[in-house]
Image (cartoon, rainbow, N blue to C red):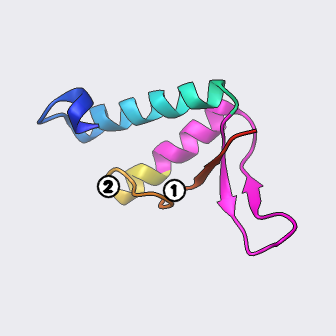
Amino acid sequence: MGSLLGRGASFEEQLALLLRIVGDLYDTGVRTGELTESATEPFLPWRPEKADALARIAAEVRQLSRLPDSGDVGWFTVP
């Protein structure tokens, strides 16, 4: 995010870009969810609505008070 926004970008600016990127991915069919222990259903998707997924990501990232590392908030799957 820093390289796209430049040094000194605020947390909220970085979060806004993150959400825009995830929203764009969502438009291409990518979905968010959780990994499970199940061999038959290893991925449990979140609710399918884009706005709900983005709101959840925003809330969880704000709770972290930093941009997430891989798996901190959720995982992505491609159809």
For the image, the number of numbered tags is: 2
Looking at the picture, does residue 69 appear above or below residue 57? below
Q: Secondary structure at mark 2?
A: loop
Q: In this orientation, which residue lies closer to the viewer: 42 or 61?
A: 42
Kindly check if marks 2 and 1 are in contact, taking CB atoms under 8 A apart as contact.
Answer: no
Instruction: Please give the name of the residue rendered at 70% of the width and 31% of the height, measured from the top-left corner.
Output: 29
What's the magenta region?
30-59
Looking at the picture, does residue 60 appear above or below residue 47? below
In the image, is residue 41 part of the stretch drawn in magenta? yes
In the image, is residue 40 part of the stretch drawn in magenta? yes
Residue 49 image-quadrant placement: top right
Looking at the picture, does residue 29 appear above or below residue 68? above
Dot 1, how many residues are within 10 Å of its Cα: few (below 14), some (14-19), or many (20+)?
some
Amino acid type, label 1: Val
Amino acid type, label 2: Ser
Q: Position of residue 75 (x, y in %)?
A: 59, 53
Q: In this orientation, which residue lies closer to the viewer: 56 or 35?
A: 35
Mark 1 — residue? Answer: 73
Q: Position of residue 46 (x, y in %)?
A: 71, 49
Q: Is residue 65 left or right of residue 22?
A: left
Q: In this orientation, which residue lies closer to the viewer: 8 or 39?
A: 39
Q: Is residue 54 left or right of residue 52?
A: left
Q: Is residue 40 left or right of residue 48?
A: right
Instruction: Please give the name of the residue rendered at 65% of the width and 38% of the height, measured from the top-left corner.
Output: 52
Mark 2 — residue? Answer: 65
Q: Secondary structure at mark 1?
A: loop
Looking at the picture, does residue 76 appear above or below residue 18? below
The earlier-in-sequence mark between 2 and 1 is: 2
Residue 15 image-quadrant placement: top left
Q: Position of residue 47 (x, y in %)?
A: 75, 44
- CA gap between label 2 and label 1 equals 12 Å
